[in-house]
Amino acid sequence: MDEHEFPGITGPMRFRPETAQPLNMLAEILLRAPHSLPPGERELIAAYVSGLNECTFCCSSHSAFAAVQLNAGMSLVDKVRADLDSAPVSPKLRALLHIAGAVQRSGRAVTTELIDAARAEGADDVEIHDTVLIAAAFCMFNRYVDGLGTFAPQRPEDYLPMASRIVEQGYGV
């Protein structure tokens, strides 16, 4: 399989479609389904965790997916990734991103204080649940992509066609 034609996770998913289906279904529910944060913010959580995990493909792709769905675009994504505490995001999203960062370090790093801080900023149980699951899932996705040594395009613009496809059609197409 040509890894330049199917970079990152797309190659392994084509190689094992029987595992791709449930993984794509999980991504679709976590990142696009209703009843949680806006999709751009959920993609930002995925990009943030993937950046912490130093997964080039997942960080770059989900940064692009977030950017096309957030009003402030890639500028906001870059600011969050560079310095979460000074990035111009809502206090609720900042608190949820702190939870995601804790999950990336260890599930046990999620403290009552982090949860209480998110609730104090207006996060509900579904948003907290989804943040934890997005962060945990992206630790898995990142290890899947990097563990198989997949190819990751280096230019940010290479991820824009994928971003358009995800926004228009969703995961698993």
Image (spheres, helix red, strand yellow):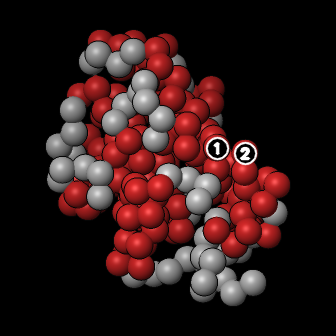
In the visual, does 22 lie left or right of 128? right
Amino acid type of the residue tagged 2 in the rendering = Pro
Q: Taking 24 as reference, is 157 above or below it?
A: below
Q: Taking 110 as reference, is 40 above or below it?
A: below
Residue 86, percent from left and from top:
20, 44
Q: Taking 83 as reference, is 157 above or below it?
A: below
In the visual, does 24 lie left or right of 12? left
Who's the residue at 59% across and 59% down the image?
173
Residue 148, percent from left and from top:
75, 69
Q: Is residue 11 visible?
A: yes
Q: Few, some or many C-alpha atoms within 10 Å of disc 1 (few <14, some 14-19, many ≥20)? A: some
Who's the residue at 28% across and 26% down the image?
92
Q: Residue 141 carries which label?
A: none
What is the secondary structure assignment of the residue under circle 1? helix
Residue 38, percent from left and from top:
34, 36
Q: Nearer the viewer, residue 31 or 100?
A: 31
- Residue designated by label 1: 25
Q: Nearer the viewer, residue 156 or 50?
A: 156
Q: Which mark is residue 22?
A: 2
Tag 1–tag 2 contact (CB < 8 Å): yes
